[in-house]
Image: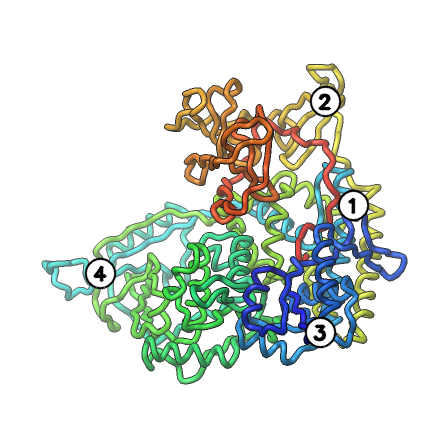
Amino acid sequence: MTAKKLVIVESPAKAKTINKYLGNEYVVKASMGHVRDLPKGKLGIDVEHDFQPDYLVIRTRGDVIKDLKKLAKSSSAVYLAPDPDREGEAIAWHLKEALALEDDTTFRVTFNEITKRAVQEAIEKPGRVRMSLVDAQQTRRILDRLVGYKLSPLLWDKIARGLSAGRVQSAAVRLIVEREREIRAFKPQEYWKIIAELKKHDDAVGAKNPKSSTFTAELKRKDDKALEIDNEKDAQAAFDAIQKATWSVTSVEQKRKSVKAAPPLSTSLLQQQASVRLRYSAKKTMMIAQQLYEGVEVGAEGSVGLITYMRTDSYRLSNDAIGATRQFIEQQFGKKYLPEKANLFAARKGAQEAHEAIRPTDITRTPDAVAQYLNKDQLRLYTLIWERVVACQMANAEFDQTSVSIAAGAYTFSARGRTLVFDGFLRLTGFEKSEDEQVLPPLVANDPLDLVNLAKSQHFTQPPQRYSEASLVKTLEKNGIGRPSTYASIISTIQDRGYVKLAERKFFATELGEVVNDSLVKHFPEIVDLEFTAGLESKLDEIEAAPEKESSGKSLGLMKSFYATLESDLGKAKVDMKNLKAVEVEGEKCPQCGKPMLLRMNRFGRFKGCSGYPECKYIERTSADGTPAAPSAPPEPTDEVCEKCGKPMVIRNGKRGRFMSCSGWPKCKNTCSVDAEGKPIRPMLVDVACEKCQAPKMVVRFSKRGPFLGCSRYPKCRGTKPLPPELKDKVKPPPKAAPVPDADGASEGADEPAPATDDGGGADD
């Protein structure tokens, strides 16, 4: 009997999809992601011996390694098939090392899409693990480890426990903090607008719809010089003079404007578009994209990968994909919607053009065709990707754009309008007019005009906008900070650490975020410098692109240089960095035990606490300057009634956001989560008996590790059970409310130890 060949991928979903494309001579198994990593609780890097990492098998991967070793020994060949990027290459190398695979029978295969053609072609033309990619990934991991394990303890010692610093997360926090300060320092400037509503002089006054040919124009110049009005007096003077003026057209300029569709989606563009159009977080977007890439059950076809690999910085489409898309456009929309040549898009600087943009694996699988197989979120993201690719190969939209200059005595007004001549790609994506967009009537020079209405209005310049997820991702990519594949985990980390909060879809820097940022900027200027961080990314790219004989040398040189700077700054910071962890408040004693009061800080902000902690747990909330904090907002009344005691339910604010609780608190401690509209999210009861107290029902609850069952009699009974497999697809975590400052619990966890942490950036950064 011929020995089978073993194919190893990261996830069971990917294994399931690939398995059906290979014959009986192949066995496809999942490694469940990384199988080795640096140890927890210690640095795990020998800085004295060329930064050798101490990799250990991840505790939960022991059985996986054991099973894969057994299969590998009985296989004629092993194909390592993790994702086609640095992280995937590193997983392949770790598998080879952990399984002690032989060079002669171990191969590396990559594919940009999980389709039968792509998988079979990859297996037919296997390669070897590329050590230059592994060196780049390992260098990034070590640099992040050094920053995390060297800087985080310093922050614990000087500011508060449980904090972390990171090569990329700290740069992201700096962007948000600096924007916050720009907004605070902003001084609005007054300006005035004068808008005229006009019509052609020969328009019939008694027409059925006298406003049908009116249009608006804005004051721009006086005596042929640009005019800016910054006070009401000047605005009124101009307004009075203009009302007496005679109006006429001085010039008309019309030109045909061609508008090209946007490029297909890279990872960062996908995150930005999903945030703006679908209101998905970066984390949610990447999770759904992973599902679409690895495979979704599509009726009789079974598991099908619907999109290409979703971690890419390229706008390139393969020739086959372009050809199939152009054929689809001609069949569905007609030849006039097909440009003579395929539309190509310039690559972003530093983009890896070996990869493709994110696209459907089969353009004929329209959103309507797969709608019955996808959940709502999957369908919306697939539609976004599918429409973007089809539109990018359609003909340009054509507009007639008109600019009109209008004289009113010494003053000049300007009017603009445009008319859609040919919809092109807008046939698919739709065309949304802006609020101030208008269609101008036919006008020529010297046409007399009549004033229908004249209005003046006061305005003020606006401060820069706070970052949204979309604009933060765009700025990180523009500055070359981190990699798009890691933005989701970075954004999650800086929120989890309490450095920023997301409210109304905008990022606000917290007091803690500002304090940590200021400390790092002052004492580690290069580590959090945006240009320095971007430069490191470029050097990692150089390691990846280097010949394999040179990549390890480049890697070592970068680590030595970086570590020398880090150690020098660290030594000075240990002495010079101000200790904000516990500052005695002069003249203040604890009202409960009489010991001195200390000004402390934790992730929820500043607070005063007794120096006798933990024996005495007295605390007071404070504002940023140490003065007593303003009282918290009163609870919001609701129409809901407490099911435990019958009293009205109210909405309160806590450190994790808004929640609903009984107005009879603290006698009745009934609470529940609320959605963004303040509606209660009722717990899901299931017919599973609690083994601890024999209560007939348990409740689906959520923790950081996912859903589980908790006793319905909590807190009297704290019995728990794992979630039964049959419920996993039916349970969704409750939506998170916008975080707000904590009103009454500043000391919770204030001085408790937190696990050692590095950058917290996840797979890459």
Q: Earlier in the sequence, mark 4 or mark 1?
A: 1
Residue type, mark 3 in image: Ala
The outermost residue toward the bottom is 340
Residue 672 position within the rendered picture, expressed as x and y whole percent measured from the top left: 48, 32
Which residue sits at x=29%, y=64%?
A: 407
Mark number, residue 610: 2
> Which mark is drawn over residue 77?
3
Task: Look at label 2 and name its amino acid.
Answer: Cys
Secondary structure beneath label 1: loop
* Residue under numbered circle 1: 41
Residue 184 visible here: no
Q: Secondary structure at mark 2?
A: strand
Q: Earlier in the sequence, mark 2 or mark 4?
A: 4
Distance in Å between CA atoms under marks 3 and 4: 77 Å
Q: Nearer the viewer, mark 2 or mark 4?
A: 2
Q: Residue at x 53, y 49 (%)?
A: 466
Between circles 3 and 4, the one closer to the viewer is 3
Q: Is residue 12 left or right of residue 640?
A: right
| Image quadrant assignment for residue 168 | bottom right
Residue at numbered disc 4: 214
Task: Name the disc covering residue 643, or none.
Answer: none
Q: Please tell me how crowded label 2 is: few (under 14), some (14-19), or many (20+) other residues with Cα within 10 Å.
A: many
Query: Could you tell me how far apart the alpha carbons at marks 3 and 1 are, in whole angstroms?
Result: 37 Å
Q: Nearer the viewer, mark 4 or mark 1?
A: 1
Of callouts 1 and 2, the N-terminal one: 1
